[in-house]
Image (cartoon, rainbow, N blue to C red):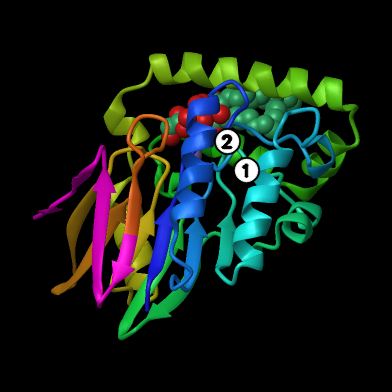
């Protein structure tokens, strides 16, 4: 079984080199690969499936469609930038939308997939943003605005987010260890895979004497990070190197 995991590509027509990297990556994936999991933040931001043309993202949708048509199952989980990806996107691209978190079994391992930001519980401002935008009423109201208005609100949110990040320590913005333990323990997980923090690594987590692993995917625009499961092993790549386990 061969499975590929990626996240945090932040695709945008303003970074064509990352988009091209993604297109080349998809083309190079051998058709023997069973599935590709995209664990959130595929896009720099997403303001609704009806706005893909205006935001210049139609090419990405078609590239995923070609992948699916060639026989690779593509799964997509929302990130904090593209939580508004909906059923029309899924239908057009052919990918299967997954809730965050999603538990899967790979060979003999129980694996939990998440975007990651829900475990950043020390970042109170982010959790507030999360609970606001995950409210279906808020989403309905936002999506009923004109595309121009949505674009303006999104760009504003991006600037506010950058300001917030400049004033907040990396420790606060990382995952909270107790939140990680809770997720692993709740479901007897062997491997937790997530992105969001852009800090690629393989961490060992001891939960009540049981050893689990937390694999963090890196971003794409600086690290081209990919996790591959093949021959019973996980192999994490970032910046062209294999990331070793950290104990
Ligand atoms: O995304 P990134 O890497 O910069 O930082 C994240 C957290 N920030 C976010 C915000 C997103 O970047 C915004 C994406 C826009 C999506 C477009 C559609 C929706 C438009 C929404 C319009 C309201 O997730 C950041 C974390 C960081 O990760 C590390 O974990 O720290 O969290 C924050 O920045 C918290 C801020 O408080 C976010 C403020 C956003 C503006 C909210 C406006 C609310 C308006 C309310 C009106 C009633
Ligand atoms: Mn994210």
User: Which residue occupies the foreground of this view, 83 or 33?
Assistant: 33
Q: Which residue is mark 2?
A: 128
Q: Secondary structure at mark 1?
A: helix
Residue 184 position, x and y percent, is 33, 67
> Measured along the vertical axis of the image, is residue 63 above or below residue 182?
above
Is any part of residue 98 visible from this angle? no
Q: Which mark is residue 180?
A: none
The image quadrant where one finds the N terminus is bottom left
* Foreground residue among 194 and 94: 94
Within the image, what quadrant is residue 41 found in?
top right
Q: Residue 170, position in %: x, y?
A: 29, 28
Q: Is residue 242 above or below residue 209?
A: above
Quarter of the image that includes the C terminus: bottom left
**Residue 18 coordinates in the image, percent (x, y):** 48, 32
Q: Height in image: 37 above or below 31?
A: above
Farthest residue toward the left?
Answer: 247
CB of mark 2 near ligand 1 (< 8 Å): yes
Q: Secondary structure at mark 2?
A: helix
Q: Which residue is mark 1?
A: 131
Q: Which residues are magenta?
A: 228-247
Residue occupying image coordinates x 59% and y 72%: 71
Q: CA–CA distance between discs 1 and 2? A: 5 Å
Q: Does the magenta-highlighted stretch encompass residue 117?
A: no
Please identify the residue farthest to the bottom as the structure is shown. Answer: 108
């Amino acid at each position: 079984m061969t499975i590929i995991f990626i996240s945090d590509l932040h695709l945008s027509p303003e970074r064509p080199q990352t988009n091209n990297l993604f297109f080349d990556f998809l083309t190079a994936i051998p058709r023997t690969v069973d599935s590709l999991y995209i664990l959130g933040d595929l896009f720099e931001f997403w303001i609704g499936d009806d706005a893909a043309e205006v935001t210049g993202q139609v090419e990405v949708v078609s590239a995923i469609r070609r992948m699916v048509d060639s026989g690779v199952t593509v799964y997509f989980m929302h990130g904090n930038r593209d939580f508004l990806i909906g059923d029309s996107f899924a239908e057009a691209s052919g990918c299967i939308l997954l809730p965050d978190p999603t538990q899967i079994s790979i060979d003999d391992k129980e694996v939990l997939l998440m975007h990651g930001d829900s475990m950043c519980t020390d970042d109170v401002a982010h959790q507030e943003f999360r609970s606001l935008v995950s409210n279906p009423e808020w989403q309905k109201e936002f999506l009923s605005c004109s595309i121009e208005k949505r674009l303006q609100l999104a760009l504003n949110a991006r600037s506010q987010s950058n300001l917030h990040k400049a004033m907040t320590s990396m420790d606060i913005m990382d995952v909270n260890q107790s939140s990680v333990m809770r997720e692993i323990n709740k479901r007897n997980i062997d491997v937790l895979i997530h992105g969001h923090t852009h800090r690629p690594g393989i961490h060992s987590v001891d939960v009540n004497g049981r050893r689990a692993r937390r694999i963090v995917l890196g971003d794409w625009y600086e690290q081209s990070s990919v996790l591959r499961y093949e021959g019973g092993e996980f192999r994490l790549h970032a910046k062209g190197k294999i990331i070793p386990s950290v104990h």
